[in-house]
Image (cartoon, rainbow, N blue to C red):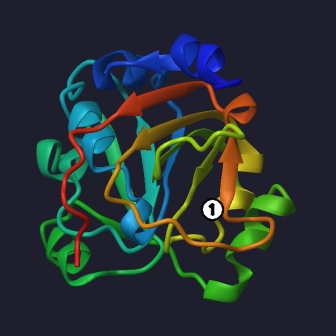
């Protein structure tokens, strides 16, 4: 495979990958099924080590590990563009903030540089023979988030369904900083 060398050079353990995240960073999680479950759990282990890391999510499936690990918000401030039932529970415990969002305007916030993203974390399909990782059923405004991010970390999950699109449904190996191979957990349904 033509892109195998690039893949190997960017391949890291989840623990190594989250070391790319620094204090005061804004971290975006991709939405819905593309939420980086493995990386979220690994980042949560850095509670007490990092300070003032702001995490944004949209439709997180379940409870975010960073919010559960740090309900006082000393290391992580967990924010949600769209309150799920789990996010509402975290909010009631003062462990999650709501960011108002008119969904169709999401990409514009990134494209107009109204918000900053230091690190983007997302779960994808395995890389194809052309060097692309597909977003599966979670295309949403993922492409705009990637373009805005200073660093991009991909968490590969073989269970992510491949979805055809035409342009904004994938990211190329040349656009990412790190690849993590997850334990191929079942996708949240």
Camera-nearest residue between 152 and 1: 1
Q: Position of residue 171 (x, y in %)?
A: 68, 48
- Residue identified by numbered label 1: 142
Instruction: Count residues near mark 1 (Cα–Cα under 10 Å), then give few for <14, some for 14-19, many for 20+.
Output: many
Q: Quadrant of the C terminus?
A: bottom left
Examine the rendering and report whether any part of residue 73 can be seen: no
- Name the residue: 35% across, 32% down: 181
Give the answer, above or below, for where 176 lies relative to 69.
Answer: above
Q: Quadrant of residue 102?
A: bottom right
Percent coordinates x, y for residue 113 in the rendering = 82, 55
State left or right for residue 75 relative to residue 145: left
Outermost residue toward the right? 112
Does 94 sit left or right of 32 as displayed?
A: left
The secondary element bearing badge 1 is classed as helix
Looking at the picture, tell me which residue is in the foreground, 112 or 91: 112
Q: Residue at x 12, y 67 (%)?
A: 93
Residue 127 percent coordinates (x, y): 55, 41
**In the picture, which quadrant includes the N terminus?**
top right
Tell me if 28 is positioned left or right of 37 in this view: right
**Is residue 155 rendered to the left or right of residue 109?**
left
Q: Quadrant of residue 92?
A: bottom left
Residue 82 image offset from top left, x and y in percent: 43, 80
Looking at the rendered structure, the number of numbered marks drawn on it comes to: 1
- For the residue pair 64 and 38, the one nearer the viewer reads as 38
Task: Give the answer, above or below, for where 160 lies relative to 176.
Answer: below
Q: Residue at x 66, y 69 (%)?
A: 141
Up-down relation of residue 43 to residue 124 (above or below):
above
Q: Residue furthest front?
A: 1
User: Is residue 57 at least partly visible in the picture?
Assistant: yes
């Amino acid at each position: 495979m033509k892109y195998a060398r690039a893949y190997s050079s960017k391949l890291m353990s989840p623990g190594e990958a989250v070391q790319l995240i620094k204090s005061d960073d804004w971290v975006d999680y991709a939405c819905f099924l593309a939420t980086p479950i493995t990386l979220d759990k690994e980042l949560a282990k850095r509670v007490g080590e990092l300070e003032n890391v702001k995490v944004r999510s949209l439709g997180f499936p379940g409870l975010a590990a960073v919010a559960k690990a740090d309900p006082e918000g000393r290391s992580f401030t967990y924010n949600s563009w769209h309150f799920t039932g789990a996010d509402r529970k975290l909010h009631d415990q003062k462990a999650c903030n709501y960011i108002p969002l008119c969904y169709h305007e999401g990409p514009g916030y990134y494209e107009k540089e109204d918000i900053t993203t230091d690190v983007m974390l997302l779960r994808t399909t395995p890389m194809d023979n052309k060097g692309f990782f597909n977003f599966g059923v979670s295309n949403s405004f993922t492409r705009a988030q990637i373009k805005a991010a200073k660093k991009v970390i991909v968490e590969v999950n073989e269970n992510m369904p491949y979805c055809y699109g035409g342009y904004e449904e994938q990211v190329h190996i040349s656009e990412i900083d790190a690849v993590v191979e997850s334990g191929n957990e079942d996708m949240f349904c």
